[in-house]
Image (cartoon, rainbow, N blue to C red):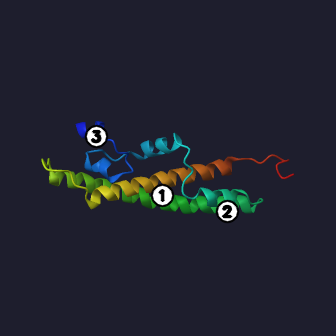
């Protein structure tokens, strides 16, 4: 990590994090960041609606949502690796510039994929929360 990355005021979800030399986070780091937050993901309302159904529709709906999110997650992981490599190549080609830093498409791409993965991890965590919840026998009364 270079000196700019240590003093970078932007988080990895912002393109300027990468413009100023910040590195893409690992999947483990993104997941840890989600786990340290209260964020439930952009599908939180949909997940809660599915979780409020009666069994067996509840479990089926939650498993269907999980399958959909996992499919998106796998695609986003693949794309995140591609844009991370593109950022690496871009930096290698650009070298050290003495001018003003500029935001390019590659910086935006990495930040967007980071945010997609952040949402995927949050959605999966929320789904797992409801799938692991065992309703009490008297919850329905």
Residue where numbered disc 3 is placed? 5
Dot 1 surroundings within 10 Å: few (below 14), some, or many (20 or more)? many
Point out the tag, 1 or 2, that comes first from the N-terminus: 2
Label 1, secondary structure: give it.
helix
Residue where numbered disc 1 is placed? 73
One can see residue 109 in this view? yes
Q: Residue at x 34, y 47 (%)?
A: 24
Q: Quadrant of the N terminus?
A: top left
Residue 114 percent across, percent down from the top left = 40, 53
Residue 133 percent across, percent down from the top left = 71, 47
Dot 2 surroundings within 10 Å: few (below 14), some, or many (20 or more)? some
Residue where numbered disc 2 is placed? 61
**In 3D space, how far apart are the residues under numbered discs 3 and 2 (Cα atoms)?**
42 Å
73 vs 106, left or right, is: right
Among all residues in the image, which is located at the extreme left? 98
Q: Residue at x 50, y 45 (%)?
A: 34
Residue contact at pointers 3 and 1, CB within 8 angstroms? no
One can see residue 2 in this view? no
């Amino acid at each position: 990590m270079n000196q700019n990355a240590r003093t970078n005021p932007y988080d990895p979800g912002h393109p300027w994090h990468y413009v100023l030399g910040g590195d893409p986070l690992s999947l483990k780091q993104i997941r840890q960041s989600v786990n340290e937050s209260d964020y439930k993901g952009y599908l939180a309302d949909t997940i809660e609606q599915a979780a409020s159904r009666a069994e067996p529709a509840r479990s089926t709906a939650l498993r269907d949502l999980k399958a959909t999110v996992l499919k998106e997650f796998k695609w986003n992981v693949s794309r995140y690796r591609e844009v991370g490599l593109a950022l690496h190549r871009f930096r290698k080609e650009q070298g050290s510039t003495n001018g003003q830093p500029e935001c390019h498409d590659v910086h935006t791409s990495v930040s967007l994929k980071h945010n997609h993965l952040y949402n995927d991890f949050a959605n999966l965590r929320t789904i797992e929360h409801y799938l692991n919840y065992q309703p009490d026998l008297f919850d329905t009364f």
